[in-house]
Image: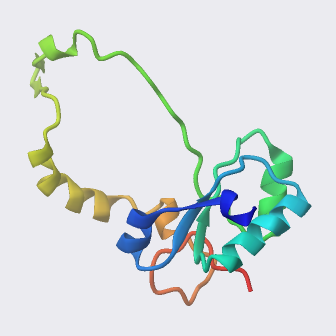
Amino acid sequence: MSHRLVCSLPWDSSHFGFSIAKALPRQLDPPAYNLLEAACIDQNIDCLYFLADAADQATIATLQAGRFDLVDIRLTLANSVRGLENIQSAGEFRFRFGQESDLEALLPIAGESYTMSRFYSTSDSTATKPRLCTRPG
């Protein structure tokens, strides 16, 4: 049962150098939290991402009581891009769709410019690398 509570994130784990997973449930009460914590211990998970509905205060309180830190509010915005391919400039600004070759310039900017994200959040003042949470125990 515990393996259905978490999903390993191989890319994140490799990139940050420790075992990272995401929780599959979106709501928790204290008994469900205990099962989730046991799954993390059983699978040697060092860091667990939990995506809760921001309006679900009971789940957030359960997570915070269990040493989770609220570090991100995620917004998903969507819009149609139809017709944008015809827009090339607006005044002095020029537009084009992004290309894979842009990554070489953008990745260093992203890595240095925004350190107020879940990847750099930690309540452990001795941490030497970004951590969202530490394995219970």
Residue drawn where x is 11% and y is 19% of the image: 89
Left or right, residue 97 beside residue 45 = left
Residue drawn where x is 75% and y is 61% of the image: 1
- Closer to us: 48 or 117: 48
Q: Residue 136's image quarter?
A: bottom right
Q: Is residue 15 above or below residue 63?
A: below
Q: How many marks?
A: 0
Quadrant assignment for the C terminus: bottom right
Tell me if I can see residue 67 in this picture.
no
Left or right, residue 56 beside residue 20 = right
Q: Position of residue 2 (x, y in %)?
A: 73, 65
Residue at the bottom extreme of this rendering: 126
Left or right, residue 51 beside residue 114 = right
Q: Position of residue 26 (x, y in %)?
A: 72, 46
Q: Position of residue 120 (x, y in %)?
A: 48, 69
Q: Residue 132's image quarter?
A: bottom right
Residue drawn where x is 77% and y is 74% of the image: 38
Structure colour scheme: rainbow
Residue drawn where x is 66% and y is 52% of the image: 24
